[in-house]
Image (spheres, helix red, strand yellow):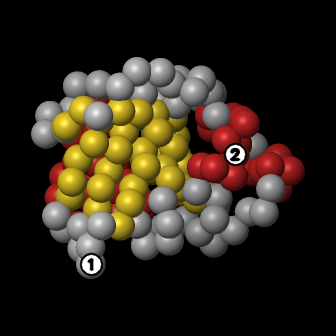
Amino acid sequence: MPTGAVSCFDATDPAATVSFGRRLGTVLKPGAVVAFYGELGAGKTTMIRGVCAGLGVTEAVKSPSFVIVTEYEGRLPVYHIDLYRLSDEQALEPIGLESYLYGNGVCLIEWAERAERLLPAETVRVRMEVTGEKSRRICVEGLSGLSGETSE
């Protein structure tokens, strides 16, 4: 697991969540793995839309729940992985998760707790919590340098 400070941000609406994700996307490097945690409706896909925009993806970003992995092209290849429908780590083998985790693109994983043991040590972890009808608390661990954050 990454060590160091956890930086948090209060997003007042989905646009703020996308904006925060966009800033995150601009600092990601080849091989980056970002794990997203949060209950259903916490805004994981919304934030990933922003991350993809920050990575230069121009096509519409949707939840890949039914296909598990959606690939996008930006300044780097982007692999949007949604593990919601998988029950255990054994179900990950057929999708070749490790080839995405250790590739040259950026791997964005929703419901990452379902693959926790497989995640690289340097994985950036984003925890999202519903704080109101449209507001979210977003905490990032394993990355520094995003403006607008408050350290905890």
Q: Residue furthest bottom?
A: 133
x and y, in percent, of residue 6 in the image: 35, 33
Which is nearer the N-term, disc 2 or disc 1?
Answer: 2
The mark lying in front, picked from 2 and 1, is: 1
Determine if residue 56 is in view. Answer: no
For disc 1, the marked residue is 133
Give percent across and percent down for residue 81.
Answer: 57, 53
Residue type marked 2 = Ala
Q: Are marks 2 and 1 in contact (CB under 8 Å)?
A: no
Question: What's the mark number on residue 43?
Answer: none
Crowding at label 2, few (<14), some or many (≥20) Cα neighbours within 10 Å?
A: some
- Front-most of residues 121 and 55: 121
SS at circle 2: helix
Q: Give the left or right position of residue 7, taking residue 112 as reference.
A: left
Q: Quadrant of residue 4?
A: top left
| Amino acid under disc 1 | Glu
From the viewer's side, name the closer residue of 31 and 143.
143
Quadrant (top left, top right, bottom left, bottom right) of the N terminus: top right
Q: Which residue is mark 2?
A: 115
Q: Is residue 2 above or below residue 136?
A: above
Question: Whole-percent x and y of residue 96?
Answer: 75, 43
> Eyeballing the image, is 51 above or below 66?
above
Relative image position of residue 77 (x, y in whole percent) = 46, 39
User: For the residues marked 2 and 1, what is the alpha-carbon distance in whole angstroms?
Assistant: 29 Å
Q: Is residue 7 left or right of residue 82?
A: left
Residue drawn at (43%, 73%) of the image: 41
